[in-house]
Structure formats: C-alpha cells, structure tokens
Image (cartoon, grey):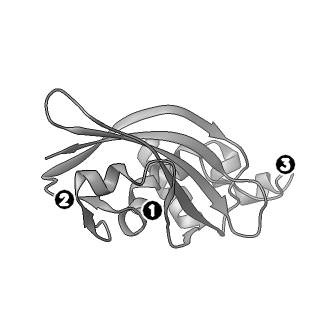
Amino acid sequence: MARNALSLAEYQALVGTEVGVSDWIEVDQAKINAFADSTGDHQFIHVDPERAKATPFGTTIAHGYLTLSLLPVMSYGALPGLAGTKMGVNYGHNKVRFMAPVKSGSKVRGRFKLANVEVRKDGSVQTTTEVSVEIEGSDKPALVAEWLTLAYI
C-alpha cells in the first residue's frame, strides 16, 4: 500500500513535484503470456519468440496495455497516501502514449509527478499524476501518461 498518509494540505503542497519512483518490475515471457491469455490478444509479436526474432525488435514485446496495467502496483510503494482514504479507484487517463517497446525480460519502473489535486463536490479527491514508465538501460520511456485517480475520504 501507500508508503505514508499525508493530510490533504500536505498532499496538495506536493503538486508540481516528483512524489515517487517505484521498484523495478521484470516483464518476463510468462507475464506476457498470462496477459495475452487474460485479454485474448495472442498477436505473435507478444507470444511467439521464434516469429518475433524476425521483427525489428528481435524478440517478443509486452503489450502496451500490460505495461499500463502495472501502474497500480508501481504506485503502491512509490506514492504517498492521503489520510482518511477509505477507498481509491482508477478514474482514467487524460493521455497515454506508448513510446518504446518493452522487450521480454526487461525491467520497468514508474516515475510519478503530482500534477493536480482537486476536491470534488461529493468530497472525493481527484488526483492527476504524470507518470513515465522507464525501461532499465533505455533512454526512452515505455510510456508516458496522465493518470487520474479518485480517493474517497
């Protein structure tokens, strides 16, 4: 879960700053295959190492949505919590761009910058976080996104 719980004022004071970097997560072929089975997306570039050797990537690559789906687990140890939160949910994304392929066996991590914190009429708190998922050893990120979450206080 979140590494610590901040008051709303403390949380809002972090807007515009990098608030955390996750641990590295290995994206191995087993994880890619499990995602393919879960989504029904068995395109060869993801699940057939022999055919994938002939592509410009030279190996299988993770689904972009697999990489995106790792954001919650990346955030658990990297982002501060908001005191009094009873439940948090994904609210969506303003932007998502898949910038570079994640080759099977690569490690990725999330880098999080708090962009906005808004208290909504119903009392929930909407957070916009800019996230970049880095690939170990690469200058180009796997993806960049504006991630929206809601915290119910």
Q: Are marks 1 and 3 in contact (CB under 8 Å)?
A: no
Q: Is residue 11 left or right of residue 94?
A: left
Identify the residue shown where x is 71% and y is 51%.
101
Is residue 151 visible to the viewer in this orientation of the structure? yes
Closer to us: 92 or 67: 92
Helix, strand or loop at mark 3: loop
Q: Residue extending furthest top?
A: 121
Identify the residue shown where x is 69% and y is 69%.
136
Q: Are marks 3 and 2 in contact (CB under 8 Å)?
A: no
Q: Which mark is residue 83?
A: 2
Helix, strand or loop at mark 2: loop
Q: Is residue 74 left or right of residue 42?
A: left
Closer to us: 85 or 87: 85
Helix, strand or loop at mark 1: helix
* Amino acid tagged 3: Thr
* Alpha carbon distance from label 3 to label 2: 48 Å
Q: Quadrant of residue 53?
A: bottom right
Closer to us: 52 or 70: 70
Between discs 2 and 1, the one toward the N terminus: 1
Is residue 42 visible to the viewer in this orientation of the structure? no
Q: Which mark is residue 98?
A: none
Identify the residue shown where x is 24% and y is 65%.
5
Provide the residue designation for mark 3: 55
Provide the residue designation for mark 1: 74
* Viewport quadrant of the N terminus: bottom left
Between discs 1 and 3, the one toward the N terminus: 3
* Label 3 neighbour load within 10 Å: few <14, some 14-19, many 20+: few
Residue 84 picture location, percent across and down: 13, 56
* Amino acid tagged 2: Ala
Identify the residue shown where x is 32% and y is 71%.
3
* Amino acid tagged 1: Met
